[in-house]
């Protein structure tokens, strides 16, 4: 039995525990909370060098989610398509280095979820405002689907959509909260997923914003 939710015990009002989304997909509730301040300092360091921006999709739409990257490779989209690049197209410079706090958390969470030895080289940082959404998609621009993806949610809550291997498969709704970490790999690696339009439920520390970053092995 994987679930160790502690709803009523102790002084800590935040839920901890594991929620299985699939055979190799798990939510680690509150896993990032002990290091949130370090992670936010990392986000600030990254965005000082590579600010959040709204990118164009190949279909000609502007994404409602603003994004940036850190690490050796960064995910981008424009009229020519989706791809990973060593260079930030806005600055012409390499993406900022991946903060040590991101690497440590990602390796710990991946091992906790059954993926020891995770060696990521890319991190996509998303910023949501009220109304921002991410339509159902697969993450398939990475070279090696054997590596997991580790996702960290900070700030406002979001309703995550977790579908199947086909776009038309029914999607389960899973709320994600400040401090939650999700790890996906193996048979769940290519499942469709998305985020419903964010409601304005301001977070006490971050206000009306949600930050999600996904740590990946892209190259
Ligand atoms: C399920 N981001 O950046 S993280 C993305 O909250 C993305 O910003 C969402 O989807 C967000 O691509 C959700 C969760 C996530 C990431 C990778 C996955 C879910 C996944 C890969 C396979 C299956
Ligand atoms: Fe995704």
Image: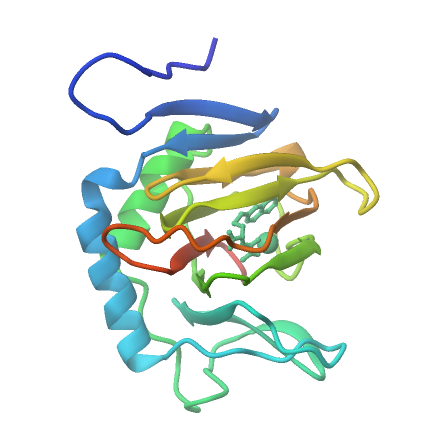
Given residues 155 and 212, the one toward you in this image is 155
Question: For the point 20% across and 39% down, which residue is it?
Answer: 34
Given residues 152 and 111, the one toward you in this image is 152
State the count of labels. 0
Given residues 216 and 8, the one toward you in this image is 8
Coordinates of residue 157 in the picture (x, y in percent): 43, 46
> Does 79 sit left or right of 211 as displayed?
right
Please identify the residue farthest to the left as the structure is shown: 11
> Does 47 sit left or right of 37 as displayed?
right
Coordinates of residue 64 in the picture (x, y in percent): 57, 70
Question: For the point 49% across and 71% down, which residue is it?
Answer: 66
Coordinates of residue 205 in the picture (x, y in percent): 23, 53
The reply to whether residue 21 is visible in this rendering is: yes
Is 43 located above or below residue 107 in the figure? below
Is 218 located above or below residue 166 in the figure? below
Coordinates of residue 127 in the picture (x, y in percent): 43, 64
Question: For the point 29% across and 64% down, which residue is it?
Answer: 43
> Does 219 sit left or right of 12 as displayed?
right
């Amino acid at each position: 039995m994987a679930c160790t939710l502690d709803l009523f015990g102790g002084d800590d009002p935040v839920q901890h525990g594991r929620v299985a989304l699939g055979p190799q997909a798990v939510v680690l509730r509150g896993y990032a909370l002990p290091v949130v301040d370090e992670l936010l300092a990392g986000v600030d360091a990254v965005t000082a060098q590579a600010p959040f921006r709204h990118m164009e999709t190949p279909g000609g739409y502007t994404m409602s989610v603003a994004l940036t990257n850190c690490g050796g490779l960064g995910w981008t989209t424009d009229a020519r398509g989706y791809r990973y690049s060593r260079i930030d197209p806005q600055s012409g410079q390499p993406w900022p280095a991946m903060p040590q706090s991101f690497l440590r958390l990602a390796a710990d969470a991946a091992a906790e979820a059954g993926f020891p030895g995770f060696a990521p080289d890319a991190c996509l940082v998303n910023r949501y405002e009220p109304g921002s959404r991410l339509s159902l998609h697969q993450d398939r621009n990475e070279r090696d689907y054997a590596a997991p993806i580790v996702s960290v949610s900070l700030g406002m809550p979001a309703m995550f959509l977790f579908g199947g291997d086909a776009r038309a498969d029914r999607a389960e709704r899973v709320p994600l909260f400040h401090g939650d970490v999700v790890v996906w790999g193996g048979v769940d690696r290519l499942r469709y997923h998305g985020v419903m339009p964010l409601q304005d439920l301001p977070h006490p520390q971050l206000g009306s914003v949600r930050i999600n970053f996904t740590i990946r092995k892209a190259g």
